[in-house]
Image (cartoon, rainbow, N blue to C red):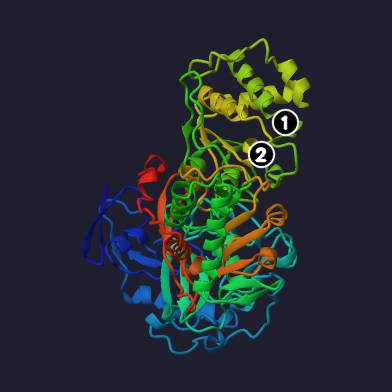
Amino acid sequence: MSQLTIDGQQIEVPDGTSILNAARKAGIEIPTLCDHPELKPYGGCRLCVVEVEGMRILQTSCTLTAMNGMVVHTNTPRVHDAHKFILGLLFSERNHFCMFCQVSNDECDLQSSALKESMTHWPLQPNWTPYPVDASHPYIVLDNNRCILCRRCVRACGELVGNFTLGNEERGAKTMVIADYNLPWGESTCIRCGTCLQVCPTGALIERQSAYRGRVIDAKHILSVCIGCSVGCGIEMVVRGDQLICVRGNWQAPVNEGILCELGRFKPMDERRERILTPMVRKNGHLETASWEEALTVISNKLKSLAKKNGSGIAALVSTRLPAETLWSFKNLFMDQLHYDMVTSIEESFPTHELPKGNGNTAIIANLKTLQESDCVVAIGTDLFKNHQVAGFFVKRNLPLGTQLIVIDPGDNEMQERAHHVLKLKKGTDRALLLGLITEVLSLNQAKCKPPDHHDIAQNSIEKTSKTTGISAKTIQNVCKIIANSQNPIFIYGKGLTSPNHDPAAVEALGDLAALVGGKILNPKGKANGLAAYAYGLTKPFDPQSQEMAYVALGDDWVSDRLIEYLGKIPFLALQTSYTSPLTDKADVVLPVTMWAEQAGSYLNLEGRLQPAKNGLEASHGILSNVEVLKALARKLGVELETNWKAALKEFIKE
């Protein structure tokens, strides 16, 4: 620990703490522009300078480490003069006409810093040279006229996301932020995560969908959870009245630490589907407006008639974007109370949660923190750069630090562009390759535990593995050496290894390999509540054959072509949904329900973290939540639903 004095306060901080963070701990505010808690100290703006006794010149507090006996002053005339001089230079360089800027009034760090120094005018004549504005990006406008060259966006793109799209061109006052080699931003390698937008301290980066819709600081800020995938990122909804102004990452969220992807930040704001506002029942071949009583009566009568007829022929499907409370009510109604044979989710394939124990060696299930610390990542049957992108960011940003990326996939995969080794094996030979890797680990005498009894070294020789998979023996040996020599290898597997047409023993082989090399395993687990659906047993493959009716709790989910094809074969379709889709055209009864921002509930993410999602908006009159619809239908059927949804998740929750 280090002890120092800041503005007369005695402060004790851990060794290595910067003066800036030491002051923050003591509640002492030091202005800064280039510093951000999630980025490495940069010291570029010079606004955080302080006076340190014994040092001749002012020091940048963000880069100076606190040491025993230091005496620091943040509020001296010399410091304030430096602040005003630096701010004056910044205001003079570019177009900072605050009254025309969308982040004016408490959202611009540059403006706020000037007002705290009682600056009411520009001390230097502004430079009127115009700078280019790049409006080619679908979500963000880059206005170099308002840029202060803090490089937060550039650093965030590299340090937090690992994409390295943004950079700088020219030198001195002519420096500009550019994408790639000065391509139009919309044509660059940008993956549209918006991290740069969230860290920008001025109006240089403008979000198209929320710009000039009033001060964000005056709106409501609701912390919730993104339901775009099973990562479960923490988000902040900015709401004014009945409108969602924007979605931001929650910097304090333990899962994503403020980072979001396009699906979490921008797609919710880009919703263009038509909303369903009232129940509808098909009459004379057309959907017509109906009351809730009429719509639920039609569904309940149909369910009762089919149940009396043969006790089967009814399929019930639910989206895994819905909260755990909804999944439980759905399962409790159709599986436990009504005992229908086909009760499942609309997930097309389900990942395995627990690995077979095999010979007593069970690979450790990893979490996202493990992913960030791994020095070797093996991705098999999954593409984290396309799906579950925030988890992919954790991989990408570690690649420049030496993490080895190995991709095993017979098809195209966006992770292959950054991979150190790509193994394009023949389809259906995943297990053979994994068994071959196990053989090679054993031949290298680098196994960290007892090998499985069921593994036959002679049967899975490296030569046979090469012939079966189409991967050269040398490549297999090289990859095996990298994995075996890694300190913290992690294996990520997805639908490519777990879909119904793949060998289920491949997952067991992966578990054996991970255990042998002391590695850990991570599985993305599909959509937002895929793990909860697995826990509730909503995993049966959907078979439309012999089904006379389907009840689908879709919520605000999208529908796949396969689901449309399957449900199109069923004579009677009841649908609870938020938006119109090709399924509503086929439905006999449509029930309007809340969308993601209007519903509260619980989500079990891919690492077993149970998180509450809050509603930021209120649904229009006449729209019910998905749980309310299921309860109303249960009452019509004379069934009382149980409420012990959390107990069924107990073994899956990692406290």
Dot 1 falls on a residue whose secondary structure is loop
Q: Position of residue 394 (x, y in %)?
A: 54, 48
Circle 2: element type: helix
From the viewer's perspective, tell me whether residue 477 is left or right of residue 346: right
Label 1 sits on what residue type?
Answer: Gly
Q: Residue at the location (45% across, 83% down)?
A: 105
Residue 179 lies in quadrant: bottom right
- Residue 70 place in picture, x, y as percent: 28, 56
Q: Amino acid at mark 2?
A: Gly
| Image coords of residue 516 (percent x, y) | 53, 22
Image quarter of the C terminus: top left
Residue position marked by numbered label 2 in the rendering: 496
Q: Is residue 84 left or right of residue 291?
A: left
Determine the residue located farthest toward the front in the rendered image.
309
Q: Is residue 588 visible?
A: yes
Which of these two is toward me, 281 or 209? 281
Residue tagged by mark 1? Answer: 428
